[in-house]
């Protein structure tokens, strides 16, 4: 089973460049989300979606855009990269509803902005 | 933004010792989860606790949810090198789909 697939695994950008981190899941999960992980700060929620066509902001949404045109895909766009966006990004998904659902994570995308 | 503080941030102990990791917040959660993350991988769920005062055991790991549903602890008995990793707690509010993660505890078990 593929689960949650993120691409690319590594990316180096220059300040001001744009890029898209791809995320796909094959578990038919309604809920998908993007987190960034920085040392000593755990995982911080960037954006999330509870279904196709629905997105909402998390704790740290500035500088990032998302869209959800299908259940399977949830891309994260950086329109003008900044050094502060250097981080490891994780996409995660789960079934919608209830309060005990397991969050399934991708393997992460390490982004460096020079 | 609610805060989930974990302590200690780093812990390095000898194989066979016992340890406890704490997850504290001023907010009340409908449920709390513990994840473990290994280098180069995403976090993986260990347990979910739902009821205040609930205790769950997973082999040598014991998880407890505080009576007031604001805190949790993870106790490991007779730690082994395979327990090494980053442990993250995560809480969900009532009626909210978002999961807030703690600051993490990086655990190293020395053979």
Image: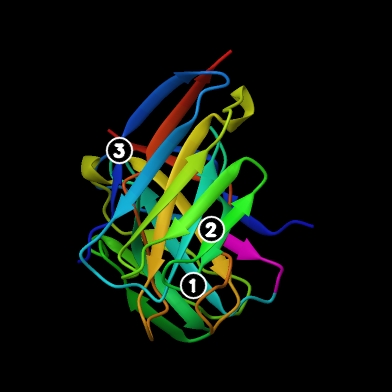
Q: Quadrant of the C terminus of chain B?
A: top right
Instruction: Identify the residue position indicated by label 3 in the image.
Output: A14
- Looking at the picture, tell me which residue is in the foreground, B80 or A34: B80
Q: Choose the circle earlier in sequence order: 2 or 3.
A: 3
The reply, left or right, for residue A12 in relation to residue A58 is: right
Span of residues in magenta:
A22-27
Which quadrant of the view contains residue B68?
A: bottom left
> Badge 3 sits on which subunit?
A
- Do the residues marked 1 and 2 share a common chain? no
> Badge 1 sits on which subunit?
B
Instruction: Identify the residue position indicated by label 2 in the image.
Output: A22
Residue A12 can be seen, yes or no: no
Q: Quadrant of the N terminus of chain B?
A: bottom left
Instruction: Identify the residue position indicated by label 1 in the image.
Output: B50
Residue A30 placed where, x, y %?
58, 80
Local crowd size for mark 3, using a 10 Å CA cut-off: few (<14), some (14–19), many (≥20): few
Residue B39 can be seen, yes or no: yes
């Amino acid at each position: 089973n593929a689960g949650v697939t993120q691409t690319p695994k590594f990316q180096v950008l220059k300040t001001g460049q744009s890029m898209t981190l791809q995320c796909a899941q094959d578990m038919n999960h309604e809920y998908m989300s993007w987190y960034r992980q920085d040392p000593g700060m755990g995982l911080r929620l960037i954006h999330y979606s509870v279904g196709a066509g629905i997105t909402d902001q998390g704790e740290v949404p500035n500088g990032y855009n998302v869209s959800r045109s299908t259940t399977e895909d949830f891309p994260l766009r950086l329109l003008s990269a900044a050094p502060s966006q250097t981080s490891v990004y994780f996409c995660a998904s789960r079934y919608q509803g209830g309060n005990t659902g397991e969050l399934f994570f991708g393997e992460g995308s390490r982004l460096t902005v020079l | 933004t609610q805060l989930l503080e974990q302590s200690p941030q780093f812990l390095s102990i000898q194989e066979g010792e016992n340890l406890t990791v704490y997850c504290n917040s001023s907010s009340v959660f409908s449920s709390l989860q513990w994840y473990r993350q290994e280098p180069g991988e995403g976090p993986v769920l260990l347990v979910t606790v739902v009821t205040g005062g609930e205790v769950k055991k997973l082999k040598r790991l014991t998880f407890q949810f505080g009576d007031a549903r604001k805190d949790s602890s993870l106790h490991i008995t007779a730690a082994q090198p395979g327990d090494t990793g980053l442990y993250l707690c995560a809480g969900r509010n009532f009626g909210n789909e978002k999961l807030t993660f703690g600051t993490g505890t990086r655990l190293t078990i020395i053979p």
